[in-house]
């Protein structure tokens, strides 16, 4: 069975500081990995995805994530956060059929 | 371009009442369709998956059902709502052709509160 763990429920970061969100997954084969962002009352927007190849993936809005097979992790990073990055972030794992398993999410608060 | 429409945006229903949420996709054909639910404080859980008209896979046992009467229409239903059915429901679609399948696209969601 596939599953995702996001250990941090809530993270507060100062504007301009760096951000790292943790994601650990369990999957029986080579996974498809995703990070989505959800603003209040909105649907999900894809930030980035990993299927294969280079383990460091660049996404939209200045985000990047690194796939580490040995650690079963796919952590999301941003060097300098903006107030508009305040949102809920979801890590997900699945396959080409997009039957995804999501983590419980990490809420990011940005303070001025 | 492809778009996904989901309605209503919010819904408050009494326990025991029926439910019908509709999702339609435009600008593509033969999509895979999905219903996800996000309960309070939890991540999204896949409820139903469909690869074609009348082909529905239920991923978790529950009080809900889904139907796909047309290629780009996906409906989530219940005959009698329970309090535990409250949550944020998201419809999604992806391209059927695996070679072209790059991501799943999500609708804006429906916030359902059962009272």
Image: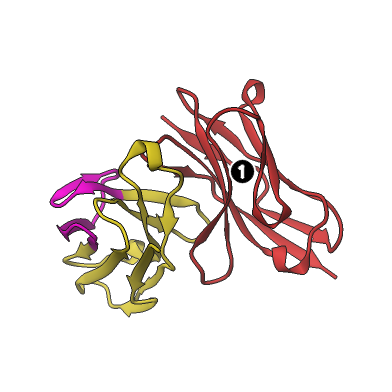
Chain colours: A red, B yellow
Q: Is residue A11 above or below residue B23?
A: above
Q: With B50 as the anchor, is B83 left or right in this view? A: right
Report x, y in % for residue B57: 22, 44
The quadrant where residue A68 appears:
top right
Q: Residue at x 39, y 57 (%)?
A: B37
Question: Is residue A44 shown in magenta?
Answer: no
Report x, y in % for residue B78: 20, 64
Q: With B55 as the anchor, is B38 left or right in this view? A: right
- Res B78 seen here: yes
Badge 1 sits on which subunit?
Answer: A
- Res A21 seen here: no
Q: Which residue is mark 1?
A: A6
Report x, y in % for residue B112: 37, 71
Q: With A106 as the anchor, is B18 left or right in this view? A: left
Magenta stretch bounds: B48-75
Q: Residue at x 38, y 73 (%)?
A: B113
Q: Residue at x 65, y 29 (%)?
A: A54
Q: Residue furthest top?
A: A70
Q: Is residue A82 above or below residue A76?
A: below
Question: Is residue B52 shown in magenta?
Answer: yes
Where the N terminus of chain B falls, by quadrant? bottom left
Q: With A83 as the anchor, is B55 left or right in this view? A: left
Report x, y in % for residue B93: 35, 54
Q: Is residue B59 above or below residue B11?
A: above
Prevailing secondary structure class for the magenta stretch in the rendered image: strand
């Amino acid at each position: 069975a596939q599953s995702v763990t996001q250990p941090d429920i809530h993270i507060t970061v100062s504007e301009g500081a760096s951000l790292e969100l943790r994601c650990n997954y369990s999957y029986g084969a080579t996974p498809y990995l995703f990070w989505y962002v959800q603003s209040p009352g909105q649907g999900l927007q894809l930030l980035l995805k990993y299927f294969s190849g280079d383990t460091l993936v660049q996404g939209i809005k200045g985000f990047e994530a690194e796939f580490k097979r040995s650690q079963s992790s796919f952590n999301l990073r941003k060097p300098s956060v903006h107030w508009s990055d305040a949102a809920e972030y979801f890590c997900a794992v699945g396959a080409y059929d997009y039957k995804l398993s999501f983590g419980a999410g990490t809420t990011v608060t940005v303070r001025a | 371009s492809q778009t996904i429409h989901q309605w209503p945006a919010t819904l408050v229903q009494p326990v025991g009442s029926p439910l019908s949420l509709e999702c339609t996709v435009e600008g593509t054909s033969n999509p895979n369709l999905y219903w996800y639910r996000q309960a309070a404080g939890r991540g999204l859980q896949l409820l139903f998956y469909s690869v074609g008209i009348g082909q529905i896979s239920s991923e978790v046992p529950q009080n809900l059902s889904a139907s796909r009467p047309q290629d780009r229409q996906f409906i989530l239903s219940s005959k009698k709502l329970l309090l535990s059915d409250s949550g944020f429901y998201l419809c999604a679609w992806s391209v059927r052709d695996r070679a072209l399948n790059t991501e799943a696209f999500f609708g804006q969601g429906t916030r359902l509160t059962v009272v």
